[in-house]
Every structure is written in C-alpha cells, then in structure tokens.
C-alpha cells in the first residue's frame, strides 16, 4: 500500500513537472513586446521564506530568558517545506507542552522581524526563478508586486532583489510595494493590476495566494494568472481555471 502511494505521488509530481515545462516554454517563446508586462509576487513565489521563518524563531530563543529545555527546542526549530508561517512547526515541537502564552510571544516576535529587512538575506531563490525572470525581462518588462510595505520593507526588498541579480532597472522594471501595511493584500494587488491593465495591452501575474488570484480572476479574467503552488495561508482554494505552476522553474 505504501509503495502504491509513493508511486501515485511520483506520477502526480511528474505530471506537474511536465505541465511546468510546457507553460514555461510557452512563456519563453512569446515574441518580444514592450506593451506586455510580467508581474511577480516575491515571497513564496520567487523566494522560499522558510529559512527566514526558522531563524526568527531561533532569534527569539537567543533574545529572551527561557527555560533551558524550551530554549534548546527553539534553537533547533525547523519547518517542513509545506508549512505556511511558523505555527505548524511550533505546534509540532511544543506538542508535549503547548504553552499558549509562549506561542503568542513567539508570533509577536516573528511579526516584528518577518516584516522587516533584518532577515531577508536568508530567503532562498526557488530553483530556476532567477533565470526565468531574467529571460522574461528580455521579452517584456518585469515588475514586482508584493504585499511587503514601503515603510518596513521597502529598502530591504530593493537590496534583496538587486543582490540576487533580479532585473530592477529604473527605466524598465518597477517594484510596487504597499503604501501602508494596513491595506489588505488582495484589494491592493487587484487595484495595482487593474492600473497596469490600463498601461499594458497584456498582463501576466505570478502569485502563490489563491485568495488574491481568485479576486483578480473575478474582476479581470483577461489578465493571465499563474498560481505558484508553494505554500499559502489556506484562506481559499484556487480557482481551477487558473494555471498552476510548481515553484521549480527549471
């Protein structure tokens, strides 16, 4: 039974990879067109943020006075590749003693540092993401549309993209950040994409959050949408009409 399950997972993964290759080949073979724009989300679309999440929890353990046993557990904190945020990992390692007050304190610490530039250097680029974006930017300009806000993450995000060699020239590319952290991501990104739709004849948008993609699809189904099947908040199921890509862009 276990063998059959593994085999089924392998077949499913192979189908996904074949689908990925076809979609990526199609994109890379589009004719050059300055009136088209490729728009990428950043977290969990171009970068795997797992290392950032893990290190923030370890930073909490190093910063605050804790029982030695709890400190040691947190210093060895690790997440699975399919974990969204830190809560699943915390519940696993603290299952013997799930202290709600401790988890709340860790999440407060995480919220302060995740939405800052302090640990962005730990993010890992998904396989092939850099090469894909660089090649697409030759075909049509690449923009970045992120839920990160200007005040807390603007400078760090620009440094991160440039140091990773993602295209970010003033005359061709654009980094779009939220003007205020209180704005809801799905509303903000919809407004920005509708604005881009007026500037370009063709818009392609790559994003990992189903709620955002579904919102855009309902309002502007002529925008080309790509669901990056990495991790997400679980607030919505992806609309089956939206193209799915695994975050392995090779």
Image (cartoon, grey):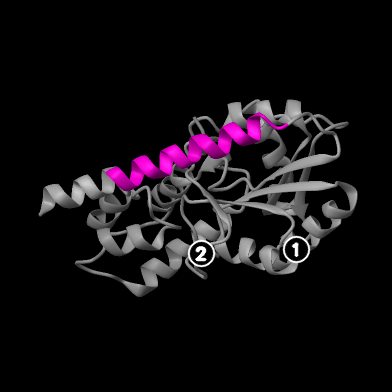
How far is disc 2 from disc 1 in space, using C-alphas? 36 Å
Residue 5 x %, y %: 19, 52
The question of residue 214 being in magenta is answered with no
Q: In the figure, is residue 22 to the left or right of 150?
A: left
Q: Is residue 93 above or below residue 160?
A: below
Q: In the figure, is residue 128 to the left or right of 94?
A: right
Residue where numbered disc 1 is placed: 220
Query: Which corner quadrant of the image does residue 13 belong to?
Result: top left
Picture mark count: 2
The answer to whether residue 1 shows anywhere in this view is yes
Q: Check disc 1: other Cα within 10 Å, few if <14, some if 14-19, many if 20+.
A: some
Instruction: Say which element carries label 1.
Output: loop
Which residue does the image show at 67% across and 64% down from the upper left?
A: 217
Q: In the figure, is residue 73 to the left or right of 20?
A: left
Residue 108, numbered label: 2
Residue 211, numbered label: none
Per the picture, the main secondary structure of the magenta-coloured stretch is helix
Residue 187 x %, y %: 73, 68
Residue 190 x %, y %: 74, 62
Tell me where the magenta segment starts and ends, as one range. Answer: 11-30
Relative depth, front residue between 240 and 237: 240
Query: Which corner quadrant of the image does residue 92 belong to?
Result: bottom left
Relative depth, front residue between 12 and 80: 12
Instruction: Say which element carries label 2.
Output: helix
Which residue does the image show at 84% across and 32% down from the upper left?
A: 172
Disc nearer the start of the sequence (2/1): 2
Which residue does the image show at 32% across and 49% down from the upper left?
A: 77
């Amino acid at each position: 039974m276990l063998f059959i399950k593994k085999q089924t997972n392998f077949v499913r993964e192979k189908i996904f990879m074949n689908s990925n290759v076809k979609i990526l080949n199609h994109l890379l073979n589009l004719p050059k067109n300055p009136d088209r724009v490729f728009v990428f989300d950043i977290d969990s679309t171009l970068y795997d943020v797992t290392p950032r999440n893990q290190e923030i929890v370890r930073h909490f353990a190093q910063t605050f006075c804790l029982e030695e046993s709890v400190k040691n557990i947190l210093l060895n904190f690790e997440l699975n590749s399919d974990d969204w945020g830190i809560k699943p990992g915390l519940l696993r390692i603290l299952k013997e003693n799930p202290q709600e007050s401790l988890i709340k304190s860790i999440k407060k610490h995480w919220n302060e540092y995740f939405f800052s530039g302090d640990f962005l250097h730990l993010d890992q680029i998904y396989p092939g993401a850099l090469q894909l974006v660089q090649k697409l930017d030759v075909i049509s300009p690449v923009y970045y549309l992120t839920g990160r806000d200007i005040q807390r993450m603007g400078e760090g995000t620009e440094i991160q993209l440039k140091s990773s060699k993602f295209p970010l020239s003033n005359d061709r590319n654009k980094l779009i950040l939220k003007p205020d952290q209180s704005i809801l991501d799905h509303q903000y990104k919809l407004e920005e994409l509708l604005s881009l739709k007026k500037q370009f004849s063709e818009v392609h948008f790559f994003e990992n959050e189903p709620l955002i993609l579904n919102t855009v699809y309902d309002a502007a189904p002529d925008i080309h949408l790509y669901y990056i099947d990495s991790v997400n908040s679980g607030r919505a199921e992806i609309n089956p009409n939206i193209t799915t890509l695994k975050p392995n862009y090779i």
